[in-house]
Amino acid sequence: MAPTKVLVTGASGYIGGSVLTRLLQSTHPDIKNLSYSVLVRKPEHAEHFKSLGMTPVMFENLDQADLLKKAASEHDIVINSASAFRAIGARALIEGLAERKKITGEPVWFIHTSGTSSVGNRPVSKIYTQEDAPFEFNDKTQDIYAYELKREAHDSYPQRACDVAVVAAGEDFNVPTYILMSPTIYGTGSGPFNKRSVQVPFLSRRALKKGYAEYIGEGAGVWDHVHIDDTTKVYELLLEKLFAQADVPFGRKGIYFGGSGRHSWKQVAEGIARAGFAAGVLEAEPRTIRLEDLAKDTPGAVEQYQELGLASRSCTNAELTREVLGWKPEIGEEAWEKGFVEEIEAAMAQ
């Protein structure tokens, strides 16, 4: 039997590149024998992955449904780590896996990368304050999918809409789907290209330009965080369980959180300020900024995205991930604090 074929989207990115590195270094017998294809836009990225024995698949965007469907139909597993905002692409990939399943008669799996901003509130705009929602979402004891459906009916958000579309497509095409919903990810990535995350690096680069760190409004929103190495371990553990034919919830019940620590957005700004002040480039104390002013001052910004990603409350309990997958985060809060120094240094180096 030929090695199981995996298609990785987002392999040039922060999460996808780090996941791919983790899997390539795995000592698990089934994972060691996987063969990989990667979806890429740039010829130089294609050449890099080709030099490592992978098959590059060139594409332009995640709305190319026919191309994505065909690519997925030639693979047994899709790890979708490209933009979590493109429901068209995600559905096409799942439909392609369904065709693969019909041809081979073998199992197929769709592993989707999402984020916990999908369950965040809207405390600044007051569009959705979550007064009827739990302070902390639990991936084992609560119906996260039902909550996402309710939120979509009230206040649609592309990432959440994609989550819903993934589950629906999995049911439509009889393909098991697994959504890994990460919080703020920090730390230097292990992939070959993009090694920086999104939220803290963005705030750090902006602070360097302004001369001081910022938080939106009161900065009272609370999120979870996790190191990139602990995040990639979730993907490896999921594959190990699937290869072992373990009972792993999927579809509506297959939404997995992955937080290990917790912070407020004001605490993030304070951490950036400490690191920047120590480096002699920032004021010692952060300042507040209005959401609308941040959006106006950020090219291409969408207020909804900035509020959900940089000001909301999104507290999660990864009980299902820990219990079903056996996930045990290994990197503690010292690394979180060190991460501010790393991001200021990275911003200064640009």
Image (spheres, grey):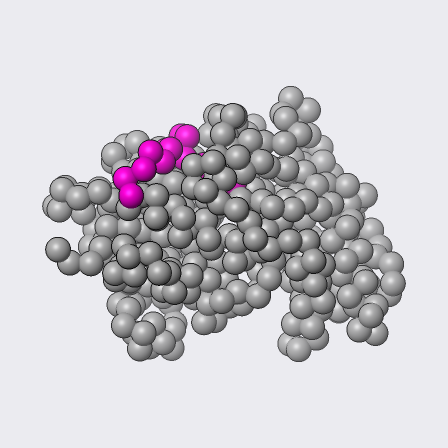
Q: Where does the magenta region start and end? A: 244-257
Q: Is residue 251 magenta?
A: yes
Q: Is residue 324 magenta?
A: no
Q: Residue at x 87, y 58 (%)?
A: 285
Q: Give the vertical position of 333 relative to 278 (above or below).
A: above
Q: Residue at x 15, y 58 (%)?
A: 2
Quadrant in which residue 126 is drawn: top right
Task: Mark yes or no: residue 331 visible.
Answer: yes
Quarter of the image with the N terminus in it = bottom left
Q: Residue at x 84, y 55 (%)?
A: 287
> Residue reaching furthest right?
284
Quadrant in which residue 36 is drawn: bottom left
- Counting the numbered discs, the total is 0
Quarter of the image with the C terminus in it = bottom right
Q: Give the vertical position of 298 relative to 192 (above or below).
A: above
Quadrant in which residue 259 is drawn: top right
Residue 304 image point, x, y percent? 62, 43
Residue 218 image point, x, y percent? 81, 43
Q: Is residue 59 left or right of residue 349?
A: left
Residue 343 image point, x, y percent? 67, 66
Task: Mark yes or no: residue 161 visible.
Answer: no
Residue 7 image point, x, y percent? 30, 57
